[in-house]
Image: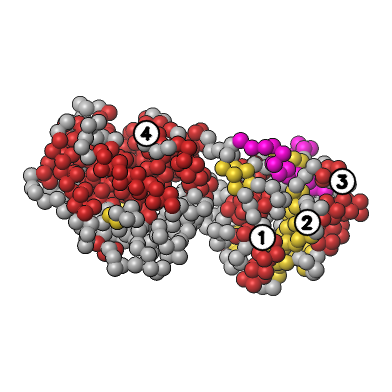
Amino acid sequence: MKNSGSRSISLILVSCFIIHTGVFDSSAQPVVGLDNWFNRETNAKTGLPYHYLWSDKEWSGYSRFGEIFESRGAKIRTVEKPTASVLDDLDIYIIVDPDTTTESKSPNYILPEDIKAIKQWVRKGGVLAVFANDGPNCEFTHLNQLMKNFGMKFNHVTLHPVTGKEFEMGACTNLPAHPLFRDVSKIYIKEVADIKLSGKARAILTEKNKVLLAEARIGKGYVFAIGDPWIYNEYIDHDRLPEGFMNRKAAENLVEMLIGNTGKPVIRKEITKEQTLNEMILANRYFIDKWPDVGKTIITDRERPSNIWTRGVYYEGLMSLYKIKPDPEYLNYAVSWGEFHKWGLRDGIQTRNADNQCCGQTYIDLYLMDETKTERIRDIKACIDNMLYTDKIDDWNWIDALQMAMPVFARIGSIYKDDKYFNRMYEMYLYTKQLHGSDGLYNTMDHLWWRDADFDPPYKEPNGEDCYWSRGNGWVLAALVRTIDFLPADSPYKTEFLTVYREMVDALVACQRDDGFWNVSLHDDSNYGGKELTGTSLFVYGIAWGINNGILDRGRYEPIVKKSWRALVEDCVHPNGFLGYVQGTGKQPSDSQPVGYENVPNFEDFGLGCFILAGSEMYKL
C-alpha cells in the first residue's frame, strides 16, 4: 500500500500555488462542473432534483463539498449535459453515481458521443473526478465504457458494508503517503465498489488487495476515481461522523489536488473580520458548552482547581473577545469564575509561583470594568505586595513565568501609579534574561529564549541546534506586549522591551513554516516538526499587536500574520469549534506528543486562550 502511494506521487503530484489575497483575476479561477445529467434523480415528494448536487443542503447533498471548492477560489456550476462546448468551459468535471432504472425511469446513460467528448477534453488538460457507488446502486455498464479509456473498471461489488451506526466498519486507517491524505490519519468510506486497474492507472488507496481509490494521468489531463459518492454532506463532518474521522480534511486535500492538476492556482480569499470573529465565537462556544460549571475542577493525571494558569490564559482570551463582542454571557462567565474562587489564587496570597498569579490578569481586568468591586483586586495585589516585601528577584526561572506574572505587575503599577511595581518587575525580568541558567535565558545572538536552565548550551536538539521551544518563546512575546500595554508613556523600561520584541519578531519570521505555522522546535524541524496551534497563535498575537500599534511595518509583517491566521482557521478549527494541533502542557518539543488535528490535549483551555488572543488582534488589522 505504501509503495503504490509513493508511485502515484511521482506520476501525479503537481504544485498548488497558494495566493493569499482577496483580489484576483477571475480568468484564473478554476471552474468546477458537477454532473446533473447522468445523475438526475428526483425527490419523490417534491419532484425536484436531489442527491449529490451543489444545491442540496440535506445529508444527500454536495453543498459542503461545493463550499470547499469556493473557499479555494473556484466557481461551481451544474452541468446539464456534457457536450464538447460545455466541457470546454470547465476545468474540473465531476460525475457522481450515474442513475440506474430504479433511480430514474429513463436514465441518461453515458453514450459513445459523451465518452468521445469527455475523453478528448481530458486529453487536452481537463480534470475528471468520478464518484461511483457500490454494486446495486450504480449504473456500471455504461460508466465502465467511459472508465476503460483511463485504465479503470468499477467492479459490481459492495465492500465496507456498515451496519447502523457501526462507523468503524467503514474506517480506513492504513493510509499511504499521498497528497490526498496529507495530515489525515483516518477516513470513512461506506459501501464502496473497488476498481480494477490497467494501463496508466495507479492505486491511491488499497485494502486487502482491493483498489478503493485510483488516479491516472491521461494526455495533459488527470482522472480521479472512487467507487462511492464518499464526501456528501452526511459523511463529511462530525455532526454525523464520530470524532476521529477526517473526511473533511481529506475533502479539502482532494479539492486542492484537483485544482492543482488543472494548472490553475488555489486562490484563497481573504479571511474577513466577520469570519475571524465567527471563528473565535465558534471555538469559545465549544468550550463554554463543554465547561458550563466555571468552578469544576480539572482532572487529568490529578485534580486541579479551575484557577490554575491554563484556565487563566483562557480567560485572557475571553476578555479580549469580550472587548470586540461585548456579549453579557462572556462577562458573566468570567465574573462567575472569579466569584467562585473568591478572587483568590491557588496557594493563597503567599504564593510566589507565577503560574498561580496568572488568574490575576483577568481579576484585574474585571476590576477595571467596575472599580467599586475592590474584592476583585484584593488578593492579587496582596500577593504581589508580599513579593515586594522581600529582596528576592530570581523567581522567574522559566520563561513561561514572564507571561504569567509580568502583566500582573504592570497592571497593578498602572492602576496605583506606583513605580515600585514596574521596578521590581523589571529586576525580575532582567534576572531571567541575563542571570538564570549559565548566562541568562535569552540568546542575544539568535534573539530567542531557552525555556529554562535545562536547555542552556551545551544542550542541543537532534540536528545540533539550540533548543528554542515555540510556545515558550510565544509566552515571552505575549508577556512583552501585555506588559508594554500598561507601561507609562515615559517608562525607562519601554526601550528594552521594544528592542527585545523587535529582535524576537524578526527571528521568528525567519523560521516560519511555508504553511504559516511554526514548528514546536523553532530551529529543528526534524524534532516533532509540523503544525502546532499554541506557539503559532502567540506569535500571531504578538506580531499583529505590533502592526496594530504602529511598531511594526504593516506592508512587511501583515502578510506574515495573515498567512498564519489562515492556517490556524482552516487547518485547526473543527466545524464544532474544537481546536486541533494543540500541544498539551510541557516544556519542550517532545512533550505531549503526538500533536494532530484530532488529538485532544490534556488541557483544552489555554490553547483556546492563545487562539482567541491571536484572533482579537487579527480582527483589529
Name the N-terminal-most of marks 2 and 3.
3
User: x and y percent of residue 406 in the render?
Assistant: 23, 44
Mark seen at residue 443: none
* Residue at which label 3 appears: 84
Mark seen at residue 220: 2
Mark seen at residue 13: 1
Q: Is residue 364 above or below residue 210?
A: above
Front residue of 330/66: it is 66
In this image, 111 relative to 175: left or right? right
Q: Are there few (<14), some (14-19), or many (20+) residues within 10 Å of tag 4?
A: few
At 72% from the left and 63% from the top, the residue drawn is 214
Dot 4 falls on a residue whose secondary structure is loop
* Residue at which label 4 appears: 549
Q: Answer whether labels 2 and 3 touch (C-beta < 8 Å).
A: no
Query: Is 359 covered by the magenta stretch?
Result: no
At 42% from the left and 44% from the top, the residue drawn is 540
User: x and y percent of residue 532 in the render?
Assistant: 44, 54
Name the N-terminal-most of marks 2 and 4.
2
Q: Answer whether labels 3 and 4 touch (C-beta < 8 Å).
A: no
User: x and y percent of residue 249 in the render?
Assistant: 58, 53
What is the spatial separation of the Cα atoms under label 2 and label 4, in whole angstroms? 50 Å
At 67% from the left and 69% from the top, the residue drawn is 7
Amino acid type of disc 1? Leu
Q: Can you tell which quarter of the image residue 151 is in?
A: bottom right
Q: What secondary structure predominates along the stretch shown in magenta?
A: loop
